[in-house]
Each structure stands twice: as C-alpha cells, then as structure tokens.
Image (cartoon, helix red, strand yellow):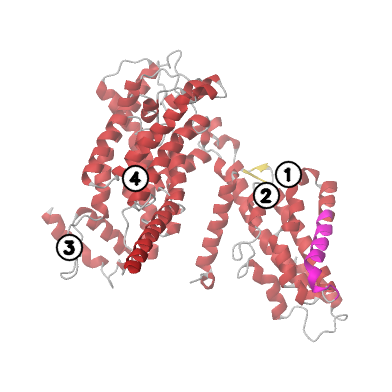
C-alpha cells in the first residue's frame, strides 16, 4: 500500500492539481484517491472537537459490509430456485455459481451507470465526488428481480441518480431514497418485469431441461394476495429460501446486518424498532378485523399471524437498510419514532389492501420520506413551544 | 405562422397609419418573449393542469395547442376592443363570457371535424375557460393595450404554451407507447414480447412523468438562459 501511495503522490497527483493538464478531472482522481487512502486534509489544530476520521466513505463501507451477507445469500437463492424449478438436484456450489453469473452483471451495471453519472456531474460542476452512490449501487441490485433486463436496471439507475439526487443538489440533499426511487421507477415503467409470478425465478432452460409440472414462481405476498394461502413455511421465509427480489428474502441475514448497523451506530435503532412495532400493530389490527374482509382471499391474508407479516417479503430489508437512510429519513430523535412507526404501519396496510402493490414497504418508505420534513418541523416547533413556556414561567417567577 | 403574419403586414400597412411600424422591435418581442424568457409554463408555471392531462399523445396536444391559440388571440382582441366600454367592476365576468363563448365555438368545431380527438380531450376543451394563462393575459395585457398588440401577445403566449405541450407530448408518446401521432415508430420486432429487447416505459403514460418532463425542460432552459435563475 505504501508503494502505491508514494506512486500516486509523486507521479500521478501533480497531473491533476490546479493548473496542471488534467485539472478538470481532479474530482475523479480525488474520489479514487480517498477511496483507497485517508483524505489528505486534517482537522484544524484549534477549535475542532471531533477528531475521529469517520467520513462518508467509511460510513458507506460499513453499510456495504452489512449488505454483503444478503448479497451472497441472494446469489445462492437465485441458483437454488432455478435448479428447483427445473427439478435438478444441484450441488451447493453449482447453485451459487449460477446465481453469481445472474446477479453480478446487475451489480456491475448498477455501479457502472450510477458512478459514471456521478463522476460526470462532479466534473461538470467541479465539486468533489460524493460517495452517496456506493450504498445505493449495492442496494439497487438487491431489490430487483433476477430476470430484469440489464438496460432497465441502467435506466432506473439513471433516473434515480439524475432526477432523484442530482437535481436536488447531490448526495445529502435528496428527498427520496435513491435506491427505492430506482425500484419505484422500474415498477411503474416496466410492471411486467417487476411484478407478477414470472420474474422472481430464472427458468431459462438449456437442451434437455424442462420446468417441472405444477411449478409456481409467485412470491409469498403474491400468493397471499391472490389466493390467501402460501406453500412456504414461516421458517423458510425467515431463512430466506423463498422467491423474491435478489437480496431481500432472508430475514435472518437482514437481522445480522441490522446488528452491525446498530452496533456501529450507523443505522438508527429507533427507526427499526418503531417500524417493527408499527407493522406488528397493523398486523394485529388485521388479525382482529379479519372477519370484515370483503373477499375470502383478503380474509385469509388478514388472518395471517402478525409476526409472519414481518418476515414475508421485503419488510425487514426495507426497514433495516432503506428506512434508516440518514438523508431522506427524519432527523430529530423523537421524529424517528413517528417516521418508523408509520412506515411499518403503512407497509402492512398497503400490502393487504392493495393486491396490485404486494410490496407495500417500497411505497410506505417513499411516502414517509415525503412526510419526514413535516414530522421534523412539528417536533422542533413542539420543543420551541415547550421551552418558551418554561422561559415564561421562569421570568414570571423572577 | 410567420409567413401569414408577413402577408397581413403587406395588406395592412396602408391602412394602419400609426407612427410605430406593425412589427417594431417592441411588438416582435410580444411574439417571441413567451417562447423563452417569459414562457407561460416553464417560467410562469401556469397552465400546468392541462399540460399534465392531455400530453399522453401528440395529436390531442397539437389540437389543444391550436385551440388555445385561437381562443387566446381572439379573446385578447375582443377584450382589447371593449376595454374602454367595460366598467371596471364587472370586467372579470365580461372576460369570462368572451372566453366561454369562444371555447364553446372551439368545442363545436372539434366535435364536428375531429370527433375522436374531441372525445379524447373531453372536458379539457371546456376547461380552457379556466386556463390561468388566458385569464392572466386578458387581465394583465388586453385590458391596457391596443387590439393589434393584444393579438400578438395572445398568439405569442398561446404558442409558447403550445410548444411546451407538444414537446412533452412528443416524448411521452414516443417513450410511453412507441408511437407518434398514432403511427408505430419503434419497430414491432424490437419488443421483448416479439423476441427483441425493448419495452415501452409505462411510467411515461402516468401524470407524474409529465411533471418530471416539464421539470427537465425547465432545467435545460435555465442552464441555457442563466438570467432566468432566481436568487
């Protein structure tokens, strides 16, 4: 590493500094340089109270680390379901390799397009490269179905980066979570490739292979919305051996990631906890009022035990990795409770009441992203009022 | 359009004995300003509702643009002619009556000659009455200017509105349904269903995407024309 550092410092850096030939590309150089090494600027000797070097890059890297288990499991899950659908007994490693071949191109496209656009905007505007896309670029492949054409991923990413982020002023200024925006865009733009029962499991067959009889590629939520029953056990759903978007199926590994995020203090436990409570309460309400459902399917869906609602679909993944986005979520500590609670509450409500949108968590988070500033506003106003009252009391007493 | 106006100049020149030439710099500005510096949609952000509603396809957008050009030009001229006779207190009602009768006229013509489009536009033809751009120009311009200047102003503003409508509709129809004016532009063999690689973007057909397209137009316009950037 030292050798690389010296090489960059002596031979490469001068070309990019002010007045040199590639001055315009300085943001690109700086981006790669600080990705590998600690940034060159230090805190001033006087007046700075925070001396830890945790910058945006380290924050992002922690989240990516928390996502890796989900990604690896997702790769295996893709292969597992593929061979299951074909009725082939494949070895673990074959399943994993098949999944990796399907998933890695989506990751590459996501990062390639997203980072390319970010670099472009940084060079045009001449500001530093922002690392905001590192996490979004990993999240987007994890919430896409495996069979989605790559160019759709590319367009969704471009939409999320340009319309979702750059027009608002770049990383840290966006009002919506970029990864979810990409998914929402793909969902509304190409519904046939983002929903239904065909897209979640890759059933491409080679010579001499065929899909087994009675195969169904529907997700648990899809099943529940249309028939009210599902063939998957809660244990399978918890471990994640169910069809779904690539990386969101395993509640177990999401919990592992949540542990890391909470331990390092990067994800807000307030949001996660209150979202789970909100989801559970909505689930309990549905349990209690199941008999008032308008159709037998809906009644069966409403009667699903509330704790199972929390492990089905992308609920856990969304709550842990998307709702806790520090930029688009609530900023005040009290506001985070409200923000999380309503995410969980609405997610379960949407998924049960609207069979067209089985993945309610996506819309619930995007909706609460819109509401987050409002929540913050009222929390702050309430605090101001409280303190004004206290002040009035004090001055009256004196 | 420019040619038509040019002809009018030739015919009218001997009649109009004003000191100012008909197409003086100031008058020309009335026509061209709404296209860029003072566009009703992208700068004044008026008339957004119809821009969202009828831009799914190109043909209704063009018909709508032409209807608004007619209503606005004629309305401006009529109100400008009456401007000294109308008592100030009832001017809004008078303007409404003028615009409403013109809109009814347009509606009947559309029903007679392009019935399909008229059905597609449905209530939005009637709603031209409430188009904020029209009332705005009547109030702000026609009440205080001569008929000729009002005519130019009406045509300019309506065309500025129409051009945005047409641009938005162009992209929405092309990307949303792969067609233009109802003709298939993107080859059928490109579609995934036929073994190709392409798929229409269904989001373009939904109203939010019209808003985003208008937003992108504003973005492009302001980065070209920096004096529009406020603050």
Q: Residue furthest top?
A: A213
Give the main secondary structure, helix, strand or loop, of the magenta stretch. helix
**Does B14 appear above or below B48?**
below
**Residue under the image location 52 percent in, 61 percent down:** B219
Give a yes or no on whether discs 3 and 1 share a subunit.
Answer: no
**Does B96 appear above or below A319?**
below
Whether residue A270 sits left or right of residue A160 in the image: it is: left
Q: Which residues are magenta?
A: B85-104
Q: Considering only order in the chain, which callout, 4 or 3, is on the residue closer to the N terminus?
A: 3
Element assignment for label 1? helix
Name the residue carrying label 1. Answer: B120
Name the residue carrying label 3. Answer: A9
Report the front residue among B19 and A348. A348
Structural distance between the alpha carbons of marks 1 and 2? 8 Å
Name the residue carrying label 2. Answer: B54
**Residue under the image location 47 percent in, 45 percent down:** A367
Name the residue carrying label 4. Answer: A324
């Amino acid at each position: 590493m030292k050798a690389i550092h010296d090489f960059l410092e002596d031979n490469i850096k001068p070309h990019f500094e002010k007045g040199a030939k590639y001055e315009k590309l300085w943001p690109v150089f700086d981006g790669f340089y600080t990705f590998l090494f600690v940034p060159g600027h230090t805190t001033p000797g006087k007046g700075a109270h925070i001396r830890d070097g945790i910058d945006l890059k380290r924050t992002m890297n922690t989240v990516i680390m928390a996502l890796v288990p989900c990604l690896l499991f997702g790769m295996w899950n893709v292969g597992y379901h593929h061979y299951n659908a074909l009725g082939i007994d494949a070895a673990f490693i074959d399943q994993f390799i098949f999944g990796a071949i399907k998933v890695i191109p989506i990751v590459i496209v996501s990062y390639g397009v997203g980072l390319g656009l970010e670099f472009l905007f940084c060079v045009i505007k001449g500001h530093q490269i922002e690392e905001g896309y590192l996490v979004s670029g990993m999240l987007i492949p994890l919430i896409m179905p495996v069979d989605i054409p790559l160019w759709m991923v590319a367009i969704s990413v471009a939409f999320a980066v340009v319309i979702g982020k750059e027009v608002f002023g770049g990383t840290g200024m966006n009002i919506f979570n970029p990864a979810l925006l990409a998914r929402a865009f793909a969902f509304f733009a190409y519904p046939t490739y983002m929903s239904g029962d065909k897209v979640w499991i890759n059933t491409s067959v080679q010579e001499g292979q065929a899909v087994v009889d009675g195969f169904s590629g529907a997700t648990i939520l899809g099943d529940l919305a249309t028939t009210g029953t599902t063939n998957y056990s809660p244990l399978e759903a918890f471990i994640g051996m169910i069809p779904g978007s690539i990386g969101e199926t395993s509640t177990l590994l999401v919990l592992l990631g949540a542990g890391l995020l909470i331990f390092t203090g990067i994800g807000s436990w307030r949001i996660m906890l209150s979202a789970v409570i909100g989801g559970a309460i909505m689930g309990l309400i549905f349990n209690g009022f199941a008999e008032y459902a308008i159709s037998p399917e809906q009644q069966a869906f409403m009667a699903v035990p509330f704790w199972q609602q929390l492990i089905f679909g992308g609920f856990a993944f969304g709550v842990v990795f998307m709702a806790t986005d520090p930029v688009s979520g609530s900023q005040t500590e009290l506001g985070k409770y409200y923000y999380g609670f309503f995410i969980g509450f609405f997610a379960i409500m949407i998924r049960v009441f609207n069979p067209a949108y089985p993945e309610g968590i996506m819309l619930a988070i995007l909706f609460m992203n819109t509401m987050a500033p409002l929540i913050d506003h009222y929390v702050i106003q309430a605090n101001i009022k409280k303190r004004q009252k206290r002040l009035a009391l004090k001055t009256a007493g004196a | 359009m420019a040619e038509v106006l040019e002809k009018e100049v030739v015919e009218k020149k001997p009649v109009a004995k004003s000191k100012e030439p008909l197409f003086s710099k100031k008058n020309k500005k009335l026509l061209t300003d709404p296209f860029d510096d003072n566009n009703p949609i992208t700068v004044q952000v008026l008339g957004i509702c119809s821009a969202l509603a009828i831009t799914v396809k190109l043909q209704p957008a063009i018909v709508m643009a032409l209807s608004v050009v007619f209503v606005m030009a004629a309305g401006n001229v009529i109100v400008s002619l009456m401007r000294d006779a109308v008592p100030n207190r009832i001017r809004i009602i008078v303007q409404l009556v003028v615009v409403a009768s013109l809109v009814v006229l347009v509606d009947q013509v559309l029903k007679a000659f392009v019935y399909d489009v008229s059905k597609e536009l449905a209530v939005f033809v009637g709603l031209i009455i409430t188009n904020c751009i029209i009332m705005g120009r009547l109030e702000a311009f026609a009440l205080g200017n001569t008929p000729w200047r009002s005519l130019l102003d009406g045509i300019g503003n309506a065309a500025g509105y129409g051009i945005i409508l047409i641009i938005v509709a162009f992209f929405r129809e092309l990307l949303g349904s792969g067609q233009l004016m109802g003709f298939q532009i993107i080859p059928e063999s490109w579609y995934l269903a036929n073994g190709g690689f392409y798929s229409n973007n269904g989001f373009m057909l939904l109203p939010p995407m019209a808003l985003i397209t208008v937003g992108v137009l504003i973005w492009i316009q302001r980065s070209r024309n920096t004096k529009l950037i406020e603050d």
